[in-house]
């Protein structure tokens, strides 16, 4: 088997979700973060629209973002739906993360390209970043909770109506490895050969 394929296969099959509280607070060097963002930039893109965008929070800005995120939840959730436990979770989500990245799709100016394709391209960019993190021994979590998909998050980031937040990425290091991965449904049930 081709060694490059085996390396790529190992990275893809080793990628795991690590909950941010399991991270240890060690800082990811800036040059590695730039390399990860550079990998993200090589996602496939229809019409060269390159719709992926990343807002990166590092050092004390991680806690600033988490505090703002928690306050957005408090101020935009009706009292009957507000959960103090969820507020605290959002507030402390980045306590041990090195970086928080809000990933979003910036809608291109080519109306012939469906928004779905722009979302798919941005998702590929996120996956590139996550796989690069795995290759560097960096733990990651792609979160969609809290106010990630709420219009108020777009407001905070000064996005346009047609732009779409795809998630909040938490990156850092963990002291213990994640368990071996698994798939519930056999591949044979997901593929039809014609």
Image (cartoon, rainbow, N blue to C red):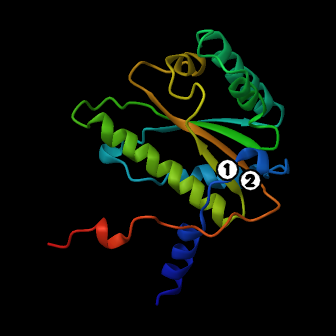
Q: 184 above or below 157? A: below
Q: How many marks?
A: 2
At 72% from the left edge and 64% from the top edge, which residue is drawn?
Answer: 137
Which sits in the foreground, 143 or 101? 143
Task: State how far apart marks 2 and 1 are (Cα).
Answer: 5 Å
Quadrant of the drawing holding the C terminus: bottom left
Which sits in the foreground, 159 or 149? 149
Q: Is residue 136 left or right of residue 1?
A: right
In the figure, residue 135 lies in which quadrant? Answer: bottom right
At 71% from the left edge and 29% from the top edge, which residue is drawn?
Answer: 90
Where is residue 32 shown, x and y percent of the image?
A: 72, 55
Residue to which mark 1 is pinned: 34
Query: In the rendered structure, are the residues bearing label 2 and label 1 in contact, judged by CB atoms less than 8 Å apart?
Result: yes
Mark 1 surroundings within 10 Å by alpha-carbon count, few (fewer than 14), some (14 through 19), many (20 or more): few
Residue that extends furthest to the bottom in the rendered view of this protein:
1
Residue to which mark 2 is pinned: 31
Q: 141 above or below 158? A: below
């Amino acid at each position: 088997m081709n060694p490059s394929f085996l390396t790529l296969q190992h990275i893809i099959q080793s990628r795991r979700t690590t909950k941010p509280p399991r991270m240890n607070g060690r800082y990811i060097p800036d040059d590695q973060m730039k390399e990860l963002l550079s990998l993200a930039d090589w996602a496939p893109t229809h019409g060269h629209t390159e719709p992926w965008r990343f807002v990166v929070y590092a050092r004390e800005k991680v806690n600033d973002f988490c505090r703002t995120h928690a306050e957005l939840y408090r101020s935009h959730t009706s009292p009957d739906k507000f959960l103090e436990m969820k507020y605290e979770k959002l507030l402390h989500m980045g306590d041990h993360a090195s970086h928080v990245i809000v990933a979003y799709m910036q809608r291109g100016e080519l109306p012939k390209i469906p928004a779905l394709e722009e979302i798919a391209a941005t998702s590929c960019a996120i996956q590139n970043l996550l796989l690069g993190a795995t290759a560097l021994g960096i733990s990651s979590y792609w979160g969609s909770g809290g106010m990630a998909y709420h219009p108020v998050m777009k407001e905070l980031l000064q996005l346009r109506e047609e732009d779409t937040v795809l998630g909040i990425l938490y990156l850092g290091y963990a002291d213990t490895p994640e368990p071996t991965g698994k798939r519930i449904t056999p591949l044979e049930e997901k593929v039809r050969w014609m």
